[in-house]
Every structure is written in structure tokens, then in C-alpha cells.
Image: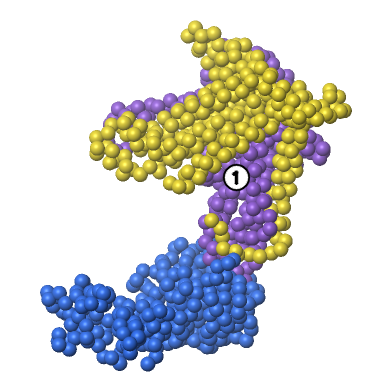
Chain colours: A yellow, B blue, C purple
Amino acid sequence: MEKRVVFRSAWLPYALVAPQIAITLVFFFWPAAQAVWYSLHLQDAFGLKVQFVGLANFATLFKDSNYLASFKVTALFSVLVAFFGIAISLLLATMADRVLRGAMAYKTLLIWPYAVAPAVAGVLWAFIFAPSIGILTYILKGWGVDWNWIIKGDQAMLLVVIAAVWKQISYNFLFFLAGLQSIPKSLIEAAAIDGASPFRRFWTIVFPLLSPTTFFLLVVNIVYAFFDTFGVIDATTQGGPGQSTNILVYKVYHDGVKAADLGGSSAQSVILMFIVIVLTVAQFRFIERKVQY
Amino acid sequence: MAEISFRNVRKSYGELEVVHGVSAEVADGEFVVIVGPSGCGKSTLLRMVAGLETITGGEISIGDRVVNLLEPKDRDIAMVFQNYALYPHMSVYDNMAYGLRIRGLARSDIDARVRRAAEILELGGFLERKPRELSGGQRQRVAMGRAIVREPAAFLFDEPLSNLDAKLRVQMRAELQALHRRLGTTSLFVTHDQVEAMTLAHRMIVMNAGRAEQIGSPLDVYANPATTFVAGFIGSPPMNLIPSERGGRPVLLGVRPEHLEPCAESEAMMTVDIDLLEPLGSDTLVYGHLAGGRDGTRVAVRLHESVDARTGHLAVRYDPAKAHFFDPQGGQRIVS
Amino acid sequence: MVENRPWLTFLSHSVLMLGVLAVAFPLYVTFIASTHTLEAIMQAPMPLVPGDQLVENFTQVLTAGSTKGSKAAGATMLVNSLVMALAIPLGKITISVISAFAIVYFRFPLRMFFFWMIFVTLMLPVEVRIIPTFKVIADLGMLNTYAGLTVPLIASATATFLFRQFFMTVPDELAEAARVDGAGPLRFFWDVLLPLSKTTMAALFVIQFIYGWNQYLWPLLITTDESMYTTVIGIKRMIVGGDAANEWNLIMATAILAMLPPALVVMLMQKWFVKGLVETEK
């Protein structure tokens, strides 16, 4: 779709896009190009000599068991975050769509975690689950659970998943609620007249009609788990204990900033860019599909 | 006040030519309607006058100026759009005043003009309202008000009535005529509705596929259509076009439905097998096809009395003076 | 609701209450912790009713930060957060609305090239180009500056697309009417397009306010000076070691400071917030 040609000017459109393009070039394209360049080079320990090494940095990465482990951790983390984030918010949205009284109040009470920074969400849950003083740790102890995420990898993973899901529920909830409210009531009524129980109606009518929203949220949640949860990890486990919560984004940061491994970190950046491109394409496929509806 | 002239005006989009050289003159103060089916290039022609489309070939002049290269604002025209194009966030007053403000008119002058236009259009009570608070007819009037306040050399109307319901359209047609009588401004009016064209126009330009098929007064065009297209487009139901022969040559015989009159079978010039009757009260439309070897050509007959359809067919005759003949190849009128 | 099933309605409310509880619980604990002395919190279980240290804790963090970790004053950090939370949406809206205007309302060489350039930034989030972007900022001398904190974050494909999408829905005739009225492109932009974009801008502003306020990785990278910390960074910098070593009462007080402004924006501007959220993602 295009507008009919309306305005003509030899210089004005360029002036109008200039700020955006300038920032894009300086802070997006130039660094991205540098990441690619560094990923193909090796720098000595003093940063004095740079040597072209081709794909050696990538080869090293894929031989590095830590990096491969980080892939697995990221996959597990994003699947857990996406699954629980979507399942819980779908449940809540379905219930909120059902109740007539108080729906608005529930909505208001459920959406505000969106306003909480991931890092802050991490700190809150780290405190609640703190091994010695956490209130939930205390309760868990009462139930005989030995809770210490600082030394137990699976508990550390659980902690960051809880913090990440908790923050993301409000977002998913809003989209599901909007999706549910756009389903024509007549469809539900027709199914009710056909004798379908509420449970059956949900799985045979509501859920299939929501599938575009669900797919969209799936992609968004995976992107969220991959990138936006950096704050959650950094404020709580910092990738530990061991490598048990060291997701890819955190590892790029750690290797580049803390360990100052320029080539390795840049190679990881390039791989991440590739992942983002795949996810973005998936997201746009979805949008195209939605347009056809 | 100005005349508008088109000299062999062409428009193409890339390779595709959509207006193939239109020439016409609009006299000062005249109300000319450009009519044709959708996609015939009529709106493009109007938009070229407005300066919203570039002119690919030929010349358009308004008054004594060739306007081909002028910006819309410098052409001294005002335009009324099909969807009114009122600025939604501005009040009725501001919508009308906007163009005047841009031109830098004095505040008192603007106010006087807006109030006068509002008075003419009976919009006085609505000046502070936003367009969304108005009915379709009122919005239409605001769009006209916006044109009037500019006191332009010419008004350009792009299907301004087509978003209104049927009843309102008739009323606005009358108001437009009254307005034109009062202001006497040269007007170009585009429509696909032949009734609008017939009722409003001093003269009309009938367009088809990028060409002006005929230019003339409504009654002249109706009485003497220049081509089979015009014969079919102007008038409802359209003129019957019956394959026939004249002087040994194949021709298309054109007879308007109201010129076919029932008669005794012995006098019949043709017989219609009736398919459908539409009693309209004042008269009755008979739709059918020709009987007897004329390959079932569809015809319509307008009768002033009801007809007994039980016989299934109707014998009709016509006054040869009211018959038209067209070349079956090009569709051109054959002048006898 | 199609039919009347009391038990189902009861179940719905129960589930929702549980959800609200789960969502609110951490906030409640945070608030309680911010009203006690460190000693009180260190006892397991910590108290679950408010203490009397609210004023003391907040005064401490607002004026002097923590005693063991970051000593950045909360007031300064709030100002820094606010600068980010305001400069990013304002900058983003400004450059996006004008570039979308150029791309929608003009035809010029390289138009699609620019469009794709902006589009591709979607695929380059800061997380994937951490080190080189840091180097660019360092080379430009923008470390520990407001410009460094905000300018690199104001380029935005989503905002540009949002405005582009909105402009596409504005009838062509409006621009044509403005042209016939004698308005040039900038005048049309200012008099017609911007007023019509108000709701889109408000929605975008709310979303981007939260985005700016909650920035973490970026300020973490480029602020080393305590006076440039944002509130979110400040919290992280107050955590110095194992859970017993931290001044949780002060950390939690700072967390309240960090959550309050964006939470208020979400609650008070809920309509714009929901609109912004749903539309930017379309």
C-alpha cells in the first residue's frame, strides 16, 4: 500500500530522515560491522596486534563445552519462560474474560509487573528466595525442602524462570485478553446451544481462534527470554552457580566485558545476530499470516 | 471567475495511458459535469485541473493562465472531495478558515468570509463543532463552505454526493444548483451518476476509457448520443440497441425504452417476449427479448399504462424519427 | 458469560485472586522489608507487618544510598532515571515521526533503502553488539553522560513503523485538501498530521517511558560514575555479596523507588499503555 504522491521537495525528506539514519549508522550499523570484523580477527593480550583468523573464533566457540552448555541453558530457560509465561497468563485471561464483575479491577491488578524492570524483578525474587533469610525459603524449609539457589544449579534456574515469568505475565495477559475479547460472542453462544461444555468450548473454539495470538506471544516470549532477561540474570545468579544459568546474552557480556575476550565475544555476537534475524523473520511471517485473515 | 480549457490533455502512469487527449472548454460561470463509469479517467482529469496530478501531455488553462506547472494553491481553485476531507481535529470554523489563514488574510476578513459562507450554507449553529459531531449532509456543507470562503475562480467537485444516502443526495443536488445560481462560479463536477449529471449540468462531458465521447448539454446528449457508449450510459434503462440492417449495411438500431409503444400485432415493428415487469407506479418497465429471429436481443420498454403480461409478449412500434443508427464496429453514430 | 454456572464463576474468581496474590506478593514483601531495620529482616522468618523504619530507610537511600555497597544517593539516581525515561521517548517520538513522515509522504531516491535500514535495526538489539557499541560510545567521549545514556537508544524501527502505519490510515484527501488550501509539507505536518497523531504519541510515550526507566544493560555498560547511576543500576550495585551481607532494607526501599514511577504511569495511563502495547507489536 502506498500513498498517492503528495509532496515534492529535493531536500526536505532527506533532512527528515537524517537524525534517525545518523543514529542508526553510528550506533547500530557501525558497531554491528565491527562485531563481524572482530569475530574474524584475533587480538593479542595487550591489544597491540590484530590478526585475521577467518572463522577460527567460531570454531573455537563450537568446541568450547561452556559455550555449547550455554546454548542448552538458553534453550531450557526460554522454553520454560515461554511455556509458563503463556500457560499462566492464558489461564488468567480466560478467567478474566469469563467474569463480568471485577474484570477491570483484575486487569489493573495484574498488569503492573510490566512496569517492573527485569533486574528489579530479579532482586525481589532473589530476596524472597534468599537462602538464609528469604521468606519463601523459610516456608520451604518448613516443608523439608533444602533451598539454596546460590549453590544448586536447578534451583538457580527455577529462580530466574520465576522472576522472568512473573514480570512477563502481565504482557501476555493483556494480549490474550484482547484476543479473547475479539472472539465474537455469537460463536461461543452457538457452541453452547450445540451443547458444548465450557471446557470443551475452550479447547475446540476459543483456543484455535486464539492461535495467532499464541504464536505471536511464543515468538515474543522467546525473544524476551533470549535478550531482555539479561537484567534478571545479572541481578541474581550472574550465570551461576557454575554455568547453570549462563544464557547466551549473559555470556557475551561476561566474555566481552569481564573477560575482555574481544574475538570470542564478537563471534558470539554474530551468532546472536543470526538468531535475532531468524526470530524476526518468524515474527514477520506471523504478521503476514495475520494480514490474510 | 474564469474559463477552463483542456487542450489535448493526456495522463499516463509509466507506460499506461489513462487519459488519451481530452479537449474541452468550460465557459466562465458554467457548470460542467464530467460523467462516466469508474476508471474512465474522469477523476484524474479533475485532479489534473486541481494540480494533484501532473499533466503528462497537453495543456490546461484556468482563466488566461496555463496552469500545468503551478502548485494547487496558485491555481485559484477550490476542491470538494468525495469523503469531504475535513480536518478532524479542527472545528467547522477552523476548517473553513484554514486556507485563508495560510494565505495570510486579516483576521476580520477571515471572520467575515466564514460567517457569510456559514450563513449561505445554514451552518451558523455548528461553527464550533468538530466534523465528527455533524451528520453526513452537514459535513458535505462544511466541505462546500471551505471552498466558498476562498472565493476561487473555479470550484472542483470530486463525486461530492456519492457518500450521501439517496434522499439527502436529491436535496444536496438542489442546494448545489441554488448555490451555483447565487455565486455563479465556474464549476467542474465529477460523478458516475448519470442522473446527477443530467440534473446539474449546463453541459456535460461523457467520458469512457480515457476519452471524451461526447460534450454537450444534457438534453442534447440524451437526444443525440454520439456513440453507443453514450446511448447506453445516459438514460435509465439504457437505450435499446438492436442489430439491424439499413441500406444493405449492418447497423445498430437505437430506440429509447419510452419511444417504444404498444400497438396491434398487425402494426408491430417488433415483438417482445416478456421476461419481467417492473411497475413503478407512474409507469411500468417491461424487460424482455425480441422474438422472431433477431437472436433474442434484450430490450426494455417504458409504458405509461399497465400491461397485461399474461399473453407473455408485447407488440411494439416506434416513430422512425426517434430512431438512431450506430456503426456496429466503432459504435459511432451514423448521421442520416 | 454464556450460561450461569456458579461453581465456574467461583473458580474463575479464585484463580484470578490467586494470580493477583502471586503478582502482588513480592511487592508486599518488598514494602514490608523497606519499613524495618536490617536486624529485623535478618531474622527468619522476617516480619510480615510493616515496621517503623520507613522514614529512616527512605531518607537514608534518598540522600546517601547504602553504607556497604553503592553510595549513590537515591534522589540523584531518580533524576538520572527520569532523564532517561523522558529523553528516550521524546527523542524516539521526534525522530520516528519525522522519518515516518518523510517515508510516507515523499517519493525520493533511496527512500526504500532508508526504510530497510531502519527496519534492520530491529535485528540489532543492544545485547548482540555490546562490546563494539561500548567502544563507539567510549571513542565519542560519551561514557558517563546523559547523551551517552539516551541518544543510542532513541533510534527505533518499531516507533517509525507505528507512525508509518498510522499515517497510512490518514486519508490521502486530507493532505490534498491541505495542499489545495495552500499548506506546504511542513505546515501540513504541523497543523494536521501531528494533532491527529496525538493518541499514537501518547501511547508510545507511556511504553517508552517504561522502557527508558527500566534500561539496565546499557547504563550498566556506560556508567561507572556513581553520580550517573540510574535507580535500577543503583539497586544492583547495592548488592555486594551473599544474602546476609546485603542491606536488604535499603535495597528494598530503593526497589520501591525504582518501581513506583513506572507503576504509576501504567496504572494512571492504563488506556494509553494498553493501546501502546498492543499497537506497537502489531
Corner quadrant of residue C280? top right
Question: Which sits in the foreground, C257 or A129?
Answer: A129
Residue A145, percent across and down? 51, 9
Question: Which sits in the foreground, A245 or C15?
Answer: A245
Badge 1 element: helix
Question: Which sits in the foreground, C63 or B142?
Answer: B142
User: Label 1 crowding class (10 Å Cα cut-off): few <14, some 14-19, many 20+?
Assistant: many
Corner quadrant of residue C182? bottom right
Residue A189, percent across and down? 29, 41
Q: In this view, does C59 lie to the left or right of B137?
A: right
The residue that label 1 is drawn on is: C158
Q: How many labels does the image show?
A: 1
- At horizontal 64% and vertical 60% (from top left) the residue drawn is C107
Which residue ends up furthest to the front in the rendered image? B248
Figure check: B87 above or below B151: above
Q: Which chain carries label 1?
A: C
Question: Which sits in the foreground, A245 or C187?
Answer: A245
Figure check: A76 above or below A32: above
Q: Is residue A151 visible?
A: yes
Which residue ends up furthest to the left in the rendered image? B310
Residue A8, percent across and down? 66, 65
Figure check: A2 above or below A213: below
- At horizontal 53% and vertical 71% (from top left) the residue drawn is B18
Q: Can residue B160 be seen in this view?
A: no
- At horizontal 38% and vertical 32% (from top left) the residue drawn is A95
Which residue ends up furthest to the right in the rendered image? A48
Residue A71, percent across and down? 61, 23
- At horizontal 52% and vertical 61% (from top left) the residue drawn is C171
Figure check: A279 above or below C236: below
- Hey, what amino acid is under mark 1? Thr
